[in-house]
Image (cartoon, coloured by chain):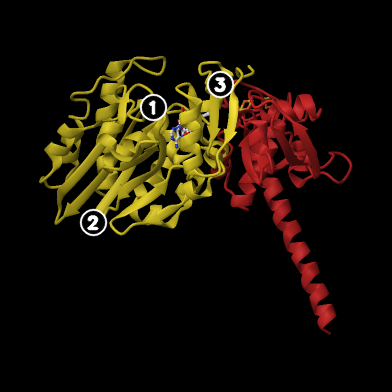
């Protein structure tokens, strides 16, 4: 069995895995990281989406051996909702009621974060395009689009505040 | 489902991949982006003895300017191709069609070479390669050979690659000035495969079509050139009626499938409508 070393949500794991083990099964069955669900057998639904070296990937379409030496972020690595240390996307999904059963939510949030990495201020249309690989059978998508718009505004504001703080510090240091 | 057992070999170079493939025998397969292969393994529609992973061979991802042509490495991802300045400048039809493939997560991992080697008649890129007269570069223990796109797609999900051949790259002749391009795709939902697609490149000169290349997705077991359309429109003045009349000929000589997305007759009709649209967009009228 090939050995792998993967960094997942900030922790390094070393394991021997069967080549046929899918990344999503490794996450769920070996590591107990069940935050990432499986919704299909055809890589259509997007429920299992994670970030692989920062880019969205369907973890049911990746072998664990292919993740060797890579960096994986799952929904569990984002933060804990309700603690004030959640990701702005998690908060926006909660506050905009962007979920009902919640099955699609982890993948939807990871895909939405990937979308904002490419386009910090997407239109409603661009959000629908960007999330085309993630299916939701409950919400009708309206509130999901709203939540991503809100997270995008929050994150841009957060980034601007952070920049002001840095500039303030630099000015302070210079004077 | 869990895939059947297989051996796994990670190749560090194209040479290593070719020898590993030869050693592993007939039932071995190349693993590129895995975006078509993994669902097949999970559904147990494919159960290779061995997978040769070429995902770490950076040299196969390179996109290079060769003067009159681009050389696109087989392992260039869809994501990379859509953004590549050389592709956008010299092969914009590839960039446009690739942007319609699947969804962002699949485009991050799926590759240009994989999409061609897979030879799915509903895939968008085979028709594009055919329209652009691309040449596919294959490597095996017997050496290297060049396969024109017109000879590459042999049958339903079957390419001209021998079981021990690795597709290393694709040479795409550059389109010079005066060319307009368009990929017209008809599908039910955003991420879905084409029910019918039309890849089109047109060169205009003084109001007339000098040169036209039209190829169809999912109008038969392999992508097809719409030669009747090309012959009709070449030399004619560009107008909405001439382009529509050219489109009327799109289904000639095709054998479209009937499946749950549509009947053969429906596809034949779609092809004529979509071809007229594609020509109109490419000729910028
Ligand atoms: C939900 C979903 C939707 C999709 N929608 C579309 C769509 O709309 N349009 C579209 O065109 N495609 C679509 N695809 C397919 C996608 O484009 C794949 O990326 C592509 O078909 C295969 O590329 P890959 O690199 O993932 O190849 P893999 O899955 O790794 O390989 C596919 C096949 O090609 C062979 N192969 C791959 N590379 C080589 C090589 N270099 N040399 C020899 N053999 C090789 C493999 O052995 C295998 O048999 C979709 C896929 C999914 C899962
Ligand atoms: S479980 Fe991965 S896409 Fe559906
Ligand atoms: S909330 Fe139920 S599938 Fe999206």
Mark 3 — residue?
B41
Mark 2 — residue?
B178
Sort mark 2 into few (<14), some (14-19) or many (20+) by Cα contacts within 10 Å. Answer: few
Beta carbon of the mark 1 residue lies under 8 A of ligand 1: yes
Mark 1 — residue?
B122
Please tell me the colour of chain B. Answer: yellow
Which residue: 26% across, 32% down? Answer: B151
Quote the CA–CA distance across marks 3 and 2. Answer: 45 Å
Say which element carries label 1. Answer: loop
Residue A3, x across and y down, in percent: 72, 34
Which residue: 35% across, 21% down? Answer: B156
Relative placement, left or right, of B211 versus B277 is: left
Task: Residue B169: tell me if it is visible.
Answer: yes
Task: Residue A48: tell me if it is visible.
Answer: no
Which residue: 29% across, 37% down? Answer: B149
- Ligand 3's image quarter is top right
Which residue appears farthest toward the right when viewing the image? A83
Which residue: 40% across, 48% down? Answer: B72
Nearest to viewer (mark 1 / mark 3)? 3
Residue B115, x across and y down, in percent: 43, 34
Q: Are marks 3 and 2 in contact (CB under 8 Å)?
A: no
Image quarter where the N terminus of chain B lies is: top right
């Amino acid at each position: 069995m090939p050995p792998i070393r993967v960094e997942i949500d900030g922790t390094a794991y070393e394991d021997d895995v069967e080549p046929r083990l899918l990344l999503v099964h490794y996450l769920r069955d070996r590591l107990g990281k069940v935050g990432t669900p499986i919704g299909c057998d055809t890589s259509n639904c997007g429920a299992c989406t994670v970030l692989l070296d920062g880019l969205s990937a369907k973890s049911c379409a990746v072998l664990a051996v292919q993740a060797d030496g890579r960096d994986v972020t799952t929904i569990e690595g984002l933060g804990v909702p309700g603690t004030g240390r959640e990701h702005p996307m998690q908060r926006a999904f909660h506050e905009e009621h962007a979920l009902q059963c919640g099955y699609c939510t982890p993948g939807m949030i990871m895909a939405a974060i990937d979308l904002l990495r490419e386009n910090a201020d997407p239109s409603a249309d661009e959000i629908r395009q960007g999330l085309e690989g993630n299916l939701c059978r409950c919400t009708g998508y309206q509130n999901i689009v709203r939540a991503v718009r809100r997270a995008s505004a929050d994150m841009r504001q957060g980034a601007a505040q952070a920049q002001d703080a840095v500039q303030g510090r630099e000015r302070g240091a210079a004077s | 489902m869990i895939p059947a057992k297989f051996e796994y070999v990670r190749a560090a170079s194209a040479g290593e991949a070719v020898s590993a493939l030869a050693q592993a025998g007939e039932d071995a397969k190349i693993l590129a982006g895995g975006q078509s292969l993994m669902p097949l393994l999970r559904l147990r529609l494919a159960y290779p003895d061995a997978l040769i992973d070429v995902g770490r061979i950076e040299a196969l991802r390179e996109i290079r300017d060769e003067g009159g042509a681009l050389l696109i490495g087989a392992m260039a991802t869809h994501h990379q191709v859509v953004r590549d300045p050389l592709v956008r400048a010299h092969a914009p039809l590839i960039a446009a069609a690739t942007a319609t493939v699947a969804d962002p997560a699949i485009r991050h991992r799926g590759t240009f070479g994989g999409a061609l080697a897979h030879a799915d008649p509903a895939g968008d890129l085979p028709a594009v390669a055919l329209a652009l007269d691309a040449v596919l570069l294959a490597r095996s223990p017997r050496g290297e050979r060049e396969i024109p796109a017109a000879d590459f797609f042999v049958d339903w999900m079957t390419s001209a690659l021998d079981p021990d051949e690795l597709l290393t790259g694709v040479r795409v002749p550059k389109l010079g000035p005066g060319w307009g391009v368009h990929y017209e795709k008809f599908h039910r939902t955003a991420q879905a495969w084409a029910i019918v697609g039309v890849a089109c490149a047109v060169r205009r000169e003084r109001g007339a079509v000098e040169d036209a290349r039209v190829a169809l997705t999912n109008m038969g077991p392999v992508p097809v050139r719409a030669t009747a359309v090309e012959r009709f429109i070449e030399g004619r003045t560009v107008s909405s009626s001439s382009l529509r009349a050219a489109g009327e000929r799109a289904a000639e000589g095709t054998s479209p499938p009937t499946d749950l997305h549509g009947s053969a007759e429906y596809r034949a009709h779609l092809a004529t409508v979509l071809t007229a649209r594609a020509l109109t967009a490419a000729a910028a009228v």
